[in-house]
């Protein structure tokens, strides 16, 4: 991990075990499958439900500042707390939580490298117990959207034929063959991808054990797509969590300086009236 | 409790790749079926045996996968 641009944002499973009783550390599980936590979790961990606790449940948006403040306080997280996030699917929604915590300026957020899968595969301890945490006082910073792309910026990138659009969904979603991953509900009217985007599925950044690839392998994966680390890169997927994973890789592991997660993603773009769409191979606009 | 008998395997179900992840915690087997790529969970089950937990997960996953439509590109 030492060769990454920001190795301090990753911890190992051993690190977690060694800090199990550290009062300055809060371990939070954030899963795609929100029932996962109830099937056993790292002792001392709490859970956040991405469907109710990491979004505004009325309008489609991330947490408002006041909502974020409440979540941190209820979770016993202070401004100086080291927050370690982990989850299923190699940290999809853990990365989503990481992204939001950075938007609100939390200083020390980290991911468990390999996520829940690595913890399980190593036969480590799980518990079914849920221990209440004492609430804390928390003061978030104002939202900094330098890492978030909104629709107008993506439309401009398409008009400018920016080479920095990265679609991290599966090739089948990218081509338009599927409107959603197999078995999941379709959330868009049209299939395909944003014109000019390249397709680098999120899991391209992961090894078989769920940990991130070594830096040289990551450079090869993303370098082959011709991404320029000096220019703005916009990542997107279907609802914004897979793309937050790639956002994390580009910004914190590879050290790209201008990476933005377009969390509107295909659920927004694929429902827009009049939005340009490409299907199949890039360049085949319809 | 420590995670025991952790295992993963990928198989075909209704024309799709499915990954089953199973482990035992105490006396209970926990199983998750996901769609392999991207790996989203389709079903999560428990059972007194590995076979029972996995069988139930596959049954539920198959229901969801059968509804998935491929479109001409």
Image: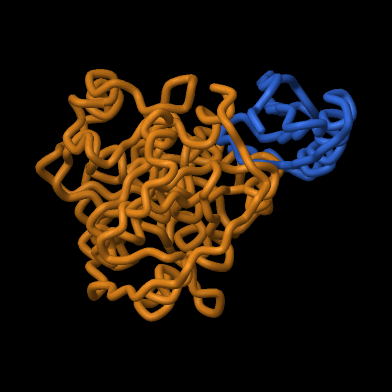
A248 or B67: which is nearer to us? A248
Report the colour scheme: by chain
> Is residue A28 visible to the viewer in this orientation of the structure?
yes
Residue B73: percent from the left, percent from the top?
A: 58, 38
Q: Horizontal placement of A152 versus B53: left or right?
A: left
Q: Horizontal placement of A137 versus B8: left or right?
A: left
Classify residue A213 by image quadrant. Answer: top left
Residue furthest to the left: A230
State the residue at coordinates (21%, 34%). Answer: A254
A182 or B43: which is nearer to us? B43
Q: Horizontal placement of A130 versus A66: left or right?
A: right
- How many numbered badges does the structure rendering display? 0
Chain painted in blue in the figure: B
The vertical placement of B39 against A43, above or below, is above
Residue B15: percent from the left, percent from the top?
A: 76, 26
The vertical placement of A240 against A199, above or below, is below
State the residue at coordinates (42%, 65%). Answer: A76
State the residue at coordinates (34%, 75%). Answer: A137
> Is residue A204 visible to the viewer in this orientation of the structure?
no
State the residue at coordinates (55%, 40%). Answer: A88
A128 or A239: which is nearer to us? A128
Q: Horizontal placement of A250 versus A27: left or right?
A: left
Residue B2: percent from the left, percent from the top?
A: 64, 29
B24 or A196: which is nearer to us? B24
Chain painted in orange in the figure: A
Quadrant into which the N terminus of chain A falls: top left
């Amino acid at each position: 991990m030492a060769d990454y641009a920001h190795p301090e944002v990753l911890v190992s499973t051993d690190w977690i075990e060694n800090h199990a009783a550290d009062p300055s550390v809060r371990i939070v599980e954030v899963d795609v499958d929100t029932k996962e936590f109830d099937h056993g979790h790292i002792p001392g961990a709490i859970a956040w439900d991405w469907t109710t606790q990491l979004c505004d449940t009325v309008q489609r948006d991330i947490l408002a500042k006041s909502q974020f403040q409440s979540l941190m306080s209820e979770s016993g997280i202070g401004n100086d707390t080291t927050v370690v996030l982990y989850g299923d699917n190699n940290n999809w929604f853990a990365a989503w939580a990481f992204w939001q915590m950075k938007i609100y300026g939390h200083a020390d957020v980290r991911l468990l490298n390999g996520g829940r899968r690595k913890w399980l595969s190593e036969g480590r301890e799980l518990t079914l117990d849920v221990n209440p945490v004492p609430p804390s006082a928390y003061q978030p910073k104002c939202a900094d959207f330098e890492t978030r792309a909104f629709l107008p910026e993506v439309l401009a990138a398409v008009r400018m034929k920016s080479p920095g659009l990265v679609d991290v969904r599966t090739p089948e979603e990218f081509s338009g063959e599927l409107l959603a991953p197999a078995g999941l509900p379709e959330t868009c009217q049209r299939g395909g991808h944003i014109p000019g985007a390249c397709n680098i599925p999120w899991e391209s950044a992961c090894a078989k054990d769920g940990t991130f690839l070594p830096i040289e392998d990551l450079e090869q994966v993303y370098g082959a797509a011709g991404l320029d680390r000096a220019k703005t890169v916009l990542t997107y997927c279907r609802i914004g969590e897979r793309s937050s994973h790639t956002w994390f890789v580009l910004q914190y592991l590879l050290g790209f300086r201008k990476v933005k997660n377009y969390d509107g993603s295909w659920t927004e773009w694929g429902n827009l009236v009049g939005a340009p769409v490409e299907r199949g191979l890039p360049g085949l606009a319809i | 409790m420590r995670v025991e008998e952790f295992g993963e395997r990928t198989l075909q179900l209704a024309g799709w790749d499915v990954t089953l992840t199973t482990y035992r915690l105490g006396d209970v087997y926990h199983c998750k079926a996901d769609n392999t790529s991207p790996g989203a969970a389709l079903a999560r089950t428990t059972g007194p045996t590995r076979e029972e937990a996995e069988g139930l997960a596959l049954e539920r996953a198959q229901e969801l996968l059968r509804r998935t439509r491929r479109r001409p590109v």
